[in-house]
Amino acid sequence: MSERKVLNKYYPPDFDPSKIPKLKLPKDRQYVVRLMAPFNMRCKTCGEYIYKGKKFNARKETVQNEAYLGLPIFRFYIKCTRCLAEITFKTDPENTDYSMEHGATRNFQAEKLLEEEEKRVQKEREDEELNNPMKVLENRTKDSKLEMEVLENLQELKDLNQRQAHVDFEAMLRQHRLSEEERQKREREEDERETAALVEEARKRRLLEDSDSEEDAAAPAPPRLAPRPNPTAILEEAPKAKRKAESWERSVGTLGNRPPLSGLVVVKKTDPGRSTRQGQASPTPGPRKSGKAADPAPWTPGTSSLSQLGAYSDSEDSSGSS
């Protein structure tokens, strides 16, 4: 690729640059350039407003017989966006700005004119003071008088405002003091309410904990329900009691006026010291003497068979032991 990038030109030995024909172009020739409107303007033909910064394809040319300190001045030709009327303006290097020439009027130019007038007056004054020392003294005297007048007018305005404004500074300070006291009082009340709420919450929590602990300590054991009697228990115990009665009759024999035990319902003997839980009366042992068996009470039709059976069993125990 390096051979394609030829930067040097070949000049033959008989090259004469004076023989090259010069291109004769007109001095006022025009170029097409792309630019933006340098200021706000209004078309004189249709009254269309053209705002600053709007883009145009303009023709540019050099102004003949005009220059500023050797700088050329250029003229631009644009067309109105509505009626296509031609508008021209020039560069102004003296004021570093643009000047309207034809086809439109410049808007918002009052401030620019005022600045130009101030600059002109200041320049004239400096020119006068440069060659006339008395003029310098006169200008300083005028400036001091003008400043004094301005200060007097300002003081008068202040006095007038003070006379018209009725402000009671003591009342303002009093109101500020009262508002500050109210604010502090309100803050104290809020702090007290918050503290009371916290104390009440802590007290409730402590009482709740104490009550829970007392209930746990003093709570009685739940009452134990007495076991309900089984209705079919007697059916299971009857055969055993019957067999025991038969064996007892065979061993002892008939006992005088006592009735036979075949027709009695015999139940198990319970401990005299144990409480009856199934509603049965505990058998009461008969009177005993040391070394002798007490005779049981004779049977009567009105007595309970259970009590008679208890008496018989007690008499057997005593006789067997003797």
Image: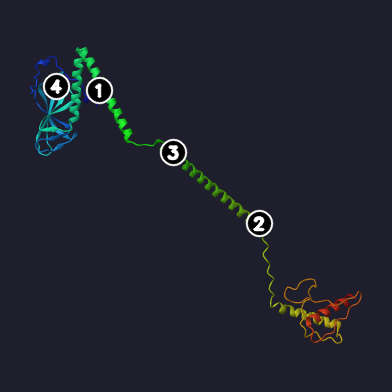
- The residue positioned 44% from the left and 38% from the top of the image is 174
Instruction: Give the image quarter of residue 280.
Output: bottom right
Quick one: quadrant of the N terminus?
top left
Q: Is residue 111 left or right of residue 18?
A: right
Which mark is drawn over residue 146?
1
27 is higher (above) or lower (below) than 231: above
Disc 3 designates what residue?
174
Q: Secondary structure at mark 3?
A: helix
Residue in the foreground of this view, choosing between 67 and 163 = 163
Q: Amino acid at mark 2?
A: Glu
Tag in front: 4 or 1: 1
Looking at marks 1 and 3 on the same chain, the residue that comes earlier in the sequence is marked by 1
Q: CA distance from mark 3 to mark 4?
A: 75 Å
Tag in front: 3 or 4: 3
Residue in the foreground of this view, choosing between 261 and 163 = 163
Q: Is residue 31 left or right of residue 219?
A: left
Looking at marks 3 and 4 on the same chain, the residue that comes earlier in the sequence is marked by 4
Q: Secondary structure at mark 4?
A: strand
Q: CA distance from mark 2 to mark 4?
A: 111 Å
Q: Amino acid at mark 4?
A: Pro
Looking at marks 2 and 1 on the same chain, the residue that comes earlier in the sequence is marked by 1
Which mark is drawn over residue 214?
2
- The residue positioned 19% from the left and 21% from the top of the image is 121
Q: CA distance from mark 4 to mark 1?
A: 45 Å
